Amino acid sequence: MANNEVQGKSLWNYALRKLLRHSAGIVGIILVSVLTLTAVFADALSFFDPTTQILEYSTKPAGFSGNILLKRNPAREEVPIYLAIEQYSLKNDTVFYTELTGIKKTIPIKQMWGDNESDWYITPTYYLGTDNFGRDLLSRILHGARISLVVGVVSVIISLIIGIILGSLAGYFRGWVDGIIQYIITVVWSYPTILLAILFSSLLKSVDDLFGFTLDAFWQTFIVIGITGWVEIARIVRGQFFSLREMEYVEATKAFGFSSFRTIFVHILPNAFGPIIVVATAGIATAIVTEASLSFLGLGIQKPTPSWGILIQEGYGFIQAGLNWGLTVFPCLAMGLAVYGFNLLGDGLRDALDPKSVQR
Amino acid sequence: MAFFALRKFLYMILVLLGVITSSFIVNYGLPGDPARVMLGQRADEQSILALRKELGLDRPKIVQYFDYIGKVCRGDLGRSLTTNRPILETIWERFSATALLTVTALFFSTFIGIIIGVIASLHQGKLLDTGIMSIALLGISLPSFVLGLILLLIFGIVLNLLPISGYIDKGWNHLILPAFALSLRPLSIIARVTRSSMLDTLGQDYVRTARAKGISEFKVITRHALRNALNPVITTVSAWFAGLLAGTYFIEFIFNWPGIGMFTIDSIFKLDYPAIQGSVLFAAVIFVIVNFIVDILYATVDPKVKIG
């Protein structure tokens, strides 16, 4: 039996191939992949825990090399105590070491961290230097990627839920439903996003419990960014539904007697996915910026969690004094690349998913 | 046209009412004691009770709501907790500084953005175009406070060319860095829109006709192509006015510019909740009014806008 059937290719297949030929799209994919991998493997990639403080190594320049002994912590088993030293020597199961202040001290080897010398003596390189608490800037930036990505994705999901529901209802039912939803969109649109976020988060910061729930800083940030970011999505979905509801297959669902709910979410919505994905990708970029802006003002993620906004805010104090500009520049760079990546990917997806766009 | 303007005006009033209502819901309608929110978690019972009475929080919500609308319409946004002065008074004092910064940035970004966009469109697909558009996307990607910090570092500290803090009373050069930092984002967006709009018009028959007539290339571009490409740009400029306003908050804070934005951010740091709430409401109202004016202007300029 001859198989003469031509294997059909889906729109997604075409879109993916187009995206892979789109130079901006490829750079976007690379940047977003790097960000995602960094977020997932932040612990493995960074030498220190992002909150580990070695106060003796406060505001060291990029490339500084540490000289550190690790001691067992009697209070907490799982974390060592870090001792910054000049030098040390080992004699008869006792470690003789010189502190940075020049004071000579001893510790029995039993109190040292781990079993081997390589466990309790380390010489880490601080590739990007340290902050004012002697924390490794690189480790903090790497962990910041995780925060930004999580905030970006979760808050965009919240925005998507609100935006898709309101947008599809407005576009499908039109008339007074559309009128009311358009009105809500216009009112929310009147507030610059960041100001609305500022208003909400300063409110959430001052209220202990809202509707009986106590929200931690993470969820506060997700929700604030989510409920300020849905407008763009609702507008796109509404526009899609306006044209899609005129299609013949929608008429067919009516002839079958399907409920409006089923028609909207099962039949029309999947056909609007392309533009929704594009706007959601750009939405992640906006959410990352909003999170950083809020954290910069102390209204988002709280210290000592290493959010990029917090890192920039901590560096800002030094920049004015003309010192340690790396503390500001490196987090700015990291955030810029992440947002740039999502914007490039969004651009690439828009061209790839648009059937009218010319194949380049 | 008069009917169109009246309809737009009535809708603007409706939107303003919605803005005031949403502000009321956020500040007074949600569970929790607004007096406690305003005074902070550590305030003593005495002062909370006093503020509750002063704000009339013991009355039914609906009475409070109409009272709130009345107050806002009379321009009463409450008093600042830190200075105890009427908030609107402080905002008006600082209005000129913010307006100067915003308008300077708007003109700069529109002018330069259009030029850059036209240049890119004339080199479509070439290295210059790709380069300009990649940088423009980077400009969109960076939030205003990051751009501000980077410019401050480069021009203010490393090169030490320009002052990094203060108002024009200490010299006009204080305006340069904040205005430039504020304009980069809208500039990038305007450049992108101008480019794509130019590419549309450059392919039109009338441009080819103009070229065939032997008109100089400069005239073809400025008089024929650009003129018709400007409509979407105007919409973008007006739409970005809001983004510009939002950007001023961080730029003013970073460059110590005594405008409304710095007042708002100072209020955030001082936990002065009435001041935060008042200045956010003020920004929203200004934005709605600006949008209304832009709509009317746009309708008078572009005959294609539906005036039905």
Image (cartoon, coloured by chain):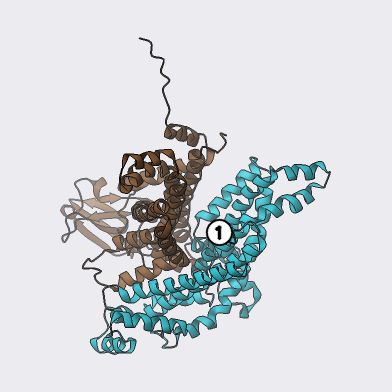
The chain containing the residue under callout 1 comes to B
Give the residue at the far top of this rendering: A1
A116 is higher (above) or lower (below) than A198: above
Instruction: Please name whichever residue, A111 or B216, is drawn nearer the observer in this view of the structure.
Output: B216
What SS does tag 1 mark? helix
Q: Amino acid at mark 1?
A: Arg
Q: Which chain is cyan?
A: B
User: Few, some or many C-alpha atoms within 10 Å of disc 1 (few <14, some 14-19, many ≥20)?
Assistant: many
Pinpoint residue B28: horizontal percent, then vertical percent: 32, 77
Confirm whether residue B89 shows in the render: yes
Q: Residue at x 41, y 55 (%)?
A: A170
Colour given to chain A in the rendered image:
brown
B227 is higher (above) or lower (below) than B159: above
Q: Residue at x 55, y 62 (%)?
A: B240
For the C terminus of chain B, the image quarter is bottom right
B287 is higher (above) or lower (below) than A254: below
For the N terminus of chain B, the image quarter is bottom right
* Pointer 1 residue: B185
Instruction: Please name whichever residue, B95 or A335, is drawn nearer the observer in this view of the structure.
Output: B95
Pinpoint residue B7: horizontal percent, then vertical percent: 54, 69
Q: Residue at x 33, y 49 (%)?
A: A47
Say left or right for B66 vs A214.
Answer: right
Say left or right for A52 vs A234.
Answer: left
Instruction: Please name whichever residue, A20 or A83, is drawn nearer the observer in this view of the structure.
Output: A20
Confirm whether residue A315 shows in the render: no
Q: Quadrant of residue B236?
A: bottom right
Pinpoint residue B51: horizontal percent, then vertical percent: 31, 87
Q: Quadrant of residue B6?
A: bottom right
Q: Residue at x 20, y 53 (%)?
A: A112
